[in-house]
Amino acid sequence: MVKKICPHCKNLLEQLKACGCQDWFCQRCGVLVSRKQALPVSAEHSEQELNSPATMATMAVRQ
């Protein structure tokens, strides 16, 4: 399964597929993210790191 992260909050995105379209949804931001805007998860990022409380706190400070 392909994993992508939100360009705004760096949280993992949920993949939405319908009628041949592929979009991504960020549960944290509550926005749809196009496949062109969604960022690929790099090898050094694990799912646990991306969703950890420390990472989320860091992202909240950046906003």
Image (tube, grey):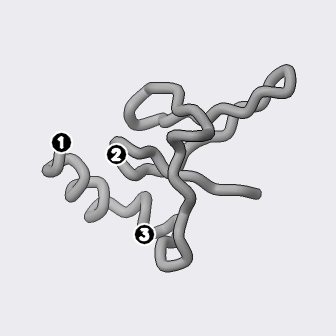
13 with respect to 20 (left or right) = left
Say which element carries label 1: loop
Residue 9, labelled with which disc? 2
Tell me, yes or no, whether the two marked residues, 1 and 2, touch with CB atoms within 8 Å.
yes
Give the farthest residue toward the top: 19
Nearest to viewer (mark 3 / mark 2): 2
The residue lying at 53 percent from left, 70 percent from top is 42
The residue lying at 62 percent from left, 39 percent from top is 35
Q: CA distance from mark 1 to mark 3?
A: 19 Å
| First reached walking from the N terminus: tag 3 or tag 2 | 2
The residue lying at 52 percent from left, 26 percent from top is 32
Residue position marked by numbered label 1 in the rendering: 63
Tell me, yes or no, whether the two marked residues, 3 and 2, touch with CB atoms within 8 Å.
no
Query: Which corner quadrant of the image does residue 52 belong to?
Result: bottom left
Callout 2, which amino acid? Answer: Cys
Residue position marked by numbered label 3 in the rendering: 49
Q: CA distance from mark 1 to mark 2?
A: 8 Å
Callout 1, which amino acid? Answer: Gln
Front residue of 41/37: it is 37
Front residue of 19/50: it is 19
Q: Position of residue 14 (x, y in %)?
A: 61, 40
| First reached walking from the N terminus: tag 1 or tag 2 | 2
Q: Point out the image quarter for the N terminus.
A: bottom right
Q: Point out the image quarter for the C terminus.
A: top left
